[in-house]
């Protein structure tokens, strides 16, 4: 039986996910559960969801298992976004963000995160739509809608394109199974406003 | 990062995105209910739109949002709640009709559900064909051959949008209301006659006798003589209905209608096709052990 394409595809999905595991972290803010986060810069900026990093500090579990303390340096509840600074033990491999403007509905999307604490779990699906959502009852903010099955603990984790670039932070699973993500562009724009990233 | 070849995953991703963009040009937004838009499919360049019946909670003040952002008022051509199909007409020409295929997708075939429930770009979910149904009968007298069941997620407003195969051709119209909780698609082959009927009559006509029946075994002698194992016992006759007016009695066993044997409920439904409405046809009935012929005038299902 000839399954060459399926095998290549399977290997490539595994490879994209394995690379992302280098920069997807676990975020523990005490209490129940915990979530996921993404290493944004080599010098130790970690981005996650506002609802994951609820307090001023959180424990960050790096891909190699090291636990470091993270300090919340900025948050934007209207985007469900929180930024932490960690004392990096050395240069960290950051995510490669991709601008949402170039994203097309129908592209393949993968999620990497820590559902129910399972480190680096992968979900496979599709970019369903590009829209706007309201997190805090204030102004709506752009979101990526994805056809992916996510679970508690995926929050703050990575939504990836077919080449492993960061499309956004998976944020919330709606009742029928709609996964929403904050676009990486939104994260980048807020970090620039806060002076946490170069323009 | 080192220069990389374009991966198969990336090629697949690009193809799917291109397919969504292409097929999405025939998918419109339909606003006909208070709690949010749904989807529709451009059937003809001259402004015929097919959508799901249940997403139209009113007959007037229906708006169609075209892929280019234009908003136009739509007139309801007709609706068929039994199959959850409705037809709209919009004042437009030169629209891109959806490319259709009547081929039956194999189980396991990769499919996309496309929709446009909100202004802006299309939406898409992906999955596979889970099963192809046999003749599916609704309580309201419709039968759909080859209903497509998939595992695609149908979000609110996905009803009325197309199911698209990997070749970009439309396999049918999605509905989440035919059977709650299932992602079902009315196949293109079943869609065509429904659309034609709605265009001609504004409704889908179905024959009607006004009887409730149940399948019963025939005695061996009758079985041999008629060449069928079962018939349909008349367990109820609607007062004033076509059957009563034609002299069909409670306790009769219907064994044939218009020359077609009646062995099962599906046989009866097939015999009561829309074009027979108003016709008087012979019915073979077993009454008091005798096979007699009764002339039955077929009515229209209300």
Image (spheres, coloured by chain):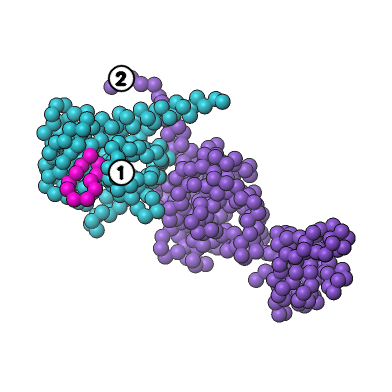
Image quadrant in which you'd find residue A10: top left
Disc 2/disc 1 C-alpha distance (Å): 32 Å
Please determine whether, in this image, residue A81 is positioned above or below residue A11: below
Which quadrant is home to the N terminus of chain B? top left
User: Which chain corresponds to the colour purple?
Assistant: B
Which quadrant is home to the C terminus of chain B? bottom right
**Left or right of A151 in this view: A188:** left
**In the foreground, B31 or A160:** A160
Residue at the image point whose x is 19% and y is 37% from the top? A61
Whether labels 2 and 1 belong to a single chain: the reply is no
**In the foreground, A28 or B181:** A28
Colour applied to chain A = cyan
Question: Residue A140, percent across and down?
Answer: 27, 53
Please determine whether, in this image, residue B37 is positioned above or below residue A102: below
Dot 1: few (<14), some (14–19), or many (≥20) neighbours within 10 Å?
Answer: many
Query: What residue would you read off at disc 1?
Result: A115
Looking at the rendering, the stretch of residues picked out in magenta corresponds to A26-36
Residue at the image point whose x is 29% and y is 32% from the top? A20
Please determine whether, in this image, residue B278 is positioned above or below residue A193: below
Q: Residue furthest top?
A: B2
Q: Are marks 2 and 1 in contact (CB under 8 Å)?
A: no
Q: Secondary structure at mark 2?
A: loop
Image quadrant in which you'd find residue B215: bottom right
Residue at the image point whose x is 49% and y is 67% from the top? B58
**Letter of the chain that mark 1 sits on in the rendering:** A
**Left or right of B71 in this view: B135:** right
Which dot marks residue B219? none
Question: Residue B159, percent across and down?
Answer: 49, 55
Query: What residue would you read off at disc 2?
Result: B2
**Left or right of B89 in this view: B71:** left
């Amino acid at each position: 039986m000839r399954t060459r394409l399926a095998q290549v595809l399977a290997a490539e999905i595994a490879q994209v996910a394995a690379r992302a595991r280098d920069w997807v972290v676990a975020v523990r803010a005490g209490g129940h559960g915990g979530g996921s986060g993404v290493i944004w810069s080599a010098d130790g900026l970690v981005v996650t969801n506002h609802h994951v990093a609820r307090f001023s500090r959180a424990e960050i579990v790096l891909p190699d298992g090291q636990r470091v303390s993270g300090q919340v340096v900025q948050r934007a509840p209207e985007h469900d976004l929180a930024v932490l600074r960690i004392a990096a033990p050395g240069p960290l491999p950051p995510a490669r963000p991709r601008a949402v403007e170039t994203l097309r509905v129908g592209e393949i999307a993968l999620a990497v995160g820590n559902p129910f604490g399972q480190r680096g779990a992968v979900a496979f699906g599709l970019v369903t739509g590009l829209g706007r959502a309201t997190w805090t009852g204030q102004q709506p903010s752009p979101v990526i809608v994805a056809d992916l099955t996510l679970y508690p603990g995926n929050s703050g984790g990575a939504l990836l394109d077919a080449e492993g670039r960061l499309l956004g932070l998976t944020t919330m699973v709606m009742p029928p199974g709609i996964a929403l993500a904050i676009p990486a562009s939104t994260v980048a724009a807020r970090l620039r406003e806060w002076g946490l990233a170069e323009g | 990062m080192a220069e990389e070849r374009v991966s198969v995953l990336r090629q697949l991703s690009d193809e799917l995105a291109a397919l969504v963009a292409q097929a999405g040009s025939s998918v419109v937004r339909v606003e006909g209910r208070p709690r949010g838009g749904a989807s529709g499919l451009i059937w003809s360049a001259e402004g015929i739109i097919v959508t799901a019946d249940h997403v139209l909670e009113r007959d007037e003040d229906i708006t169609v949002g075209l892929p280019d952002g234009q908003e136009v008022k739509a007139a309801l051509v007709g609706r068929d709640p039994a199959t959850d199909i409705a037809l709209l007409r919009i004042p437009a020409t030169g629209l891109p009709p959806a490319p259709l295929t009547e081929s039956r997708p194999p189980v396991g075939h990769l499919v996309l559900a496309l929709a446009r429930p909100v202004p802006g770009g299309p939406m898409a979910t992906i999955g596979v064909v889970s099963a192809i149904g046999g003749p599916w009968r609704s309580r309201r007298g419709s039968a759909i051959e080859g209903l497509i069941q998939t595992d695609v997620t149908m979000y609110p407003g996905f009803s009325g949008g197309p199911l698209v195969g990997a070749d970009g051709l439309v396999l049918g119209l999605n509905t989440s209301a035919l059977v709650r909780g299932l992602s079902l698609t009315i196949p293109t082959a079943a869609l065509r006659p429904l659309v034609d009927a709605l265009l001609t009559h504004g409704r889908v006509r179905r024959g009607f006798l006004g009887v409730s029946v149940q399948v019963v075994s025939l005695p061996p002698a009758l079985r041999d003589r008629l060449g069928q194992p079962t018939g349909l016992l008349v367990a109820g006759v609607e007062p004033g209905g076509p059957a009563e007016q034609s002299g069909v009695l409670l306790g009769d066993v219907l064994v044939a209608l218009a020359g077609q044997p009646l062995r099962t409920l599906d046989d009866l439904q097939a015999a009561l096709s829309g074009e027979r409405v108003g016709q008087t046809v012979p019915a073979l009935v077993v009454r008091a052990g005798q096979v007699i012929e009764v002339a039955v005038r077929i009515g229209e299902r209300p």
